[in-house]
Amino acid sequence: MRIGLLTSGGDCPGLNAVIRGAVLNGVKTYDDEFVGFRDGWRGVVEGDIMDLPRTRVRGLARTGGTILGTSRTNPFDGPQGGPENISVMLERHAIDAIVAIGGEGTLAGAKRLSDAGLPVVGVPKTIDNDLNATDYTFGFDTAVSIATDAMDRLRTTGESHHRCMVAEVMGRHVGWIALHSGMSAGAHAVLIPEQKVPMTQVADWVREVHERGRSPLVVVAEGFIPEGLDEVVHEKGLEQDGRPRLGGIGEYVTHEIERMTGIEARNTTLGHIQRGGAPTGFDRVLATRMGMAVVDLVHDRQWGKMVGLDSTDITRVDFEEALSGLKTVPQARWDEAKVLFGR
Ligand code: F6P
């Protein structure tokens, strides 16, 4: 078969490992040929493709970013978009299947195309780990590891200056990165979008730690909103275009801690550093396995499905299941983490 791969949406460590896994399995097991669509769905609607021979994927598992490029283009937009045009493009380039590697938005586009009868399958991708129907997505472990390393560094400078250090991590809708990196770095408070915590409680946790002579570390997910602040988030400039503004809530929480406790505090927004660079070993393995498995999915003509992870097994799930809502941090995980906060 001749298979077209695309990476779409925000990038993520492990994308290149998926591409390599797919090409190696396809070439070795099925004698497949591969092409890549440049910059996500843009390459699909414009027929902008590149050849992906086996030699092109050599050494890719250890690299960050995506060799195919990415964009947030929607496959239904513009005069060249939509299933009929894409079908003509596939025929023109003799492509038998599309593998869409992406997050919620990408997979929603992939689902609409497969519902319209196109041969489309998917690989889930997000550093936020908020996709349903898979226990983990590659990129998450790398993001947690980068954030942990950053927090370890914040701890030493915080201790020297007797300051409260605040680290803002990614997580627009869910707090998985904050929860895991905070627990890993021994944070004294973790603030996530799923839990409304009043600033008075945050100030109490910080005070308790400071009184013990330690430097408090507070981890905030970018989508966290303190209790009672919903109405004023926009007014206070914590959002941009209806989305959390990177640095917005970190700065706000830091300022409030200083104001309420009198303890000197500093904010560090980790931002896109969490998405850059080489994937961890865990993510390389997960991404490689998913890339290999999605080629088997194509050969079984399981259109409308994506690969997932269930415990240690690679599974096949309907796009619908993956898109049935965000995978948020359960109450039990929050209650467990909370035992470690403050004193
Ligand atoms: O990949 C998801 C995510 O990392 C979110 O946590 C974050 O809000 C967003 O991407 C940032 O996206 P962009 O690169 O478009 O600023």
Image (cartoon, grey):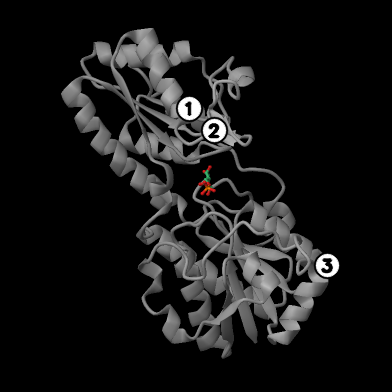
The residue under the point 43% across, 21% down is: 253
Residue at disc 1, secondary structure = helix
Residue type at mark 3: give it.
Ala
Q: Which residue is mark 3?
A: 116
Instruction: Provide the residue designation for mark 1.
Output: 249
Q: Is mark 1 within 8 Å of ligand 1?
A: no
What residue is disc 2 on? 223
**Res 156 quadrant in image:** top left
Q: Earlier in the sequence, mark 3 or mark 2?
A: 3
In the rendered view, does 96 fall on the left or right side of 287?
Answer: right
Secondary structure at numbered mark 3: loop
From mark 2 to mark 1, how far is it between C-alphas?
8 Å
Q: Is residue 133 above or below residue 295?
A: above
Quarter of the figure that contains the C terminus: top left
The residue shown at (39%, 54%) is: 276
Q: Are marks 2 and 1 in contact (CB under 8 Å)?
A: yes
Earlier in the chain: of badge 2 and badge 1, it is 2
* Image: 158 above or below 25: above
Q: Amino acid at mark 1?
A: Ile
Badge 3 crowding class, 10 Å Cα cut-off, few under 14, some 14 to 19, many 20 or more, is few
Count of picture labels: 3
Quote the CA–CA distance across marks 3 and 1.
41 Å
Mark 2 or mark 1: which is in front?
1
Queried on whether the Cβ of the residue with tag 2 lies below 8 angstroms from ligand 1, the answer reads yes
Disc 2 crowd rating (10 Å Cα; few below 14, some 14-19, many 20+) is: many
